[in-house]
Amino acid sequence: MDTKLTTKPAKEGAKTMNQPVAARQSVYRVNDLNLWYGDDHALKDVNLDIKQNEVTAIIGPSGCGKSTFIKTLNRMVELVPIVRTNGVIEYHGRNIFDKDYEVEELRTSVGMVFQQPNPFPKSIYDNIAYGPRVHGVKNKKILDEIVERSLRGAAIWEEVKDRLNENAYGLSGGQQQRLCIARCLAIEPDVILMDEPTSALDPISTLKVEELVQELKKDYSIIIVTHNMQQAARVSDKTAFFLNGEVVEFDQTDRIFSNPSDKRTEDYISGRFG
Amino acid sequence: MALPEKQPVQKKFIDPVAVKKSISQRLVVNNITKIIFLIGLLFGLVVLGILLFGVVRDGAAWLSLDFLQNAPSRRPDRAGIYPALMGSIFLMLLIIPMIFILGVGAAIYLEEYAKKGRMTSFIEVNISNLAGVPSIVFGLLGLTFFVRNMGFGSTLIAGALTLALMSLPVVIVSSQEAIRAVPQAMRHASLALGASKWQTTFKVVLPASLPGVITGIILAVSRAIGETAPLIMVGAAIFIARAPEGIFSEFTALPIQIYNWTSRPQADFQGLAAAGIIVLMVILLTMNSLAIWIRNRFSKRY
């Protein structure tokens, strides 16, 4: 994980973002992924290469398969009983569809933040400690430390530090979503999947989550589905444009938004449909 | 996202004058239905009130500490309900763990593990049907299976198993509903953190549905405690002087004792029966209040 730090240029500003950073390791390599809900072909020959410590945005109109795709990355999509997939998704070189790859293991290194904030009806502390406890951490001191670190990581520590034992449902929607991000950080993941994380939030909470994404990018690889194109432009390094289950274009975000190579991308971005 | 274009002026289908005219008529219907519903409520309340009044008038004089501590006797002034009371309490203590483990287990399996399909819905429909089977049929089943085949005889355990069997369908259905009411988002949150299905069920789904589950269990137990027919079939003793000593003792229960007393001609025994009803009712009301308290105290809002 640390090797890429040394190969990265010392100053990484907006300028270098235009150039492909070949030195970065791939987190996910998606090869010819197809997915069906029953007879409905929801993902068609998807090929993507997702790099470490980047924010990858997935945009596209409703029903284009972007949520399906992100849920496939941690195999949450399989909770729908009629789902069939073929193709390969390599996570750090290992196919996540392999028989001996347990979903529990995968989901411990790939955290997920959902569209609607979904804290457990437990205290703030227990919400964060849930993941570590599930994975066998019992020591109260260690749990305390994880809780504080995760809440700090999600920029919500200052707001909740005096009421860790209160029910998480007392928090505002925006705070709940950051709590969910903190809960996700507590399992010390490597990738964070975000499925339209701000669609239920007000503009100020949205801004906070977006700033957080920039912050988190230093330590995590982030894949974010959004229907808000400005958001994709603001937060992401790379953008994939999905349409009818296909990846129309996948490139550096500023290229997608300034000089897309596909007509359909241009139409979508300029608001002609979607 | 695009703004709707300016619409041409449309013809209106709702005529404001006609609306104004019909309003007074609609309000009359409104009031009539309100009165009908009120009568429905009052009917139940009044009958219940008369019943309670009658029972308390007849039985209150017989209530005393001795009544709770004595065994039944041929002499009304020395008769008590101690063995029946203890029998009912023991039954309750045996039934609760049985229906909790079996009922909640079945509900968890049906909701969380079973593949939704024809087989599952066939099973679910039949469980609901079982809830409607007359209790005496369960009594017959208990007599055949527990008393005779398993060789328990007319003992406390045979009675408890029979009543548990009778309560199970209700417990399974109410637990299923409580489990189903836990939002999918909770399960997804847990699964996405790498928790296994069992951890998700045990740490998230079950705690969130527990108030509903417990409410269902208490209501089912209350009903079981008031049952007479299955216990008569199983062969609970009509007259017994001592509290049960273990699960293989003979036993009697409150409803049976009450039934026994009401069938005697002497007025004094009618009074004793009324006093027994008061005791049974206090137990039931306490349990139901407990159920309501649990529901209000612990129920979670999502």
Image (cartoon, coloured by chain):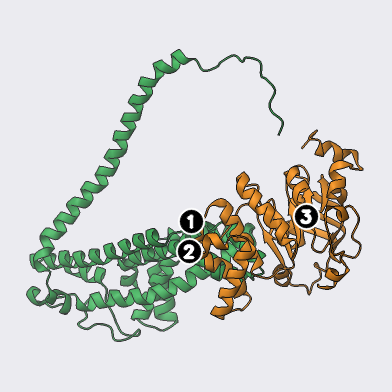
Chain colours: A orange, B green
Q: Are marks 2 and 3 on the same chain?
A: yes
User: In terms of depth relative to the viewer, which is nearer, A153 or B149?
Assistant: A153
A161 on left or right of B158: right
The N terminus of chain A, quarter of image: bottom right
Is there CB contact under 8 Å for labels 2 and 1?
yes
Closest to the observer, B175 or A175: A175
Q: Residue at x 16, y 59 (%)?
A: B55
Neighbours of disc 3 within 10 Å: few (<14), some (14-19), many (20+):
many
Mark 2 residue type: Arg
What's the mark number on residue A163? 2
Closer to us: mark 2 or mark 3? Answer: 2
The residues bearing labels 3 and 1 have C-alpha atoms spaced at a distance of 32 Å
State the image coordinates of residue A224 (x, y, percent, origin top left): 74, 54
Instruction: State the image quarter where residue B256 is shown.
Output: bottom left
Indicate the position of residue A125 as horizontal and vertical percent values.
53, 68
Residue B116 visible in rendering: yes
x and y, in percent, of residue B120 in the image: 60, 60
Q: Which mark is residue A170?
A: 1
The chain to which mark 3 is attached is A
Residue found 80% across the figure and 67% down from its top: A96
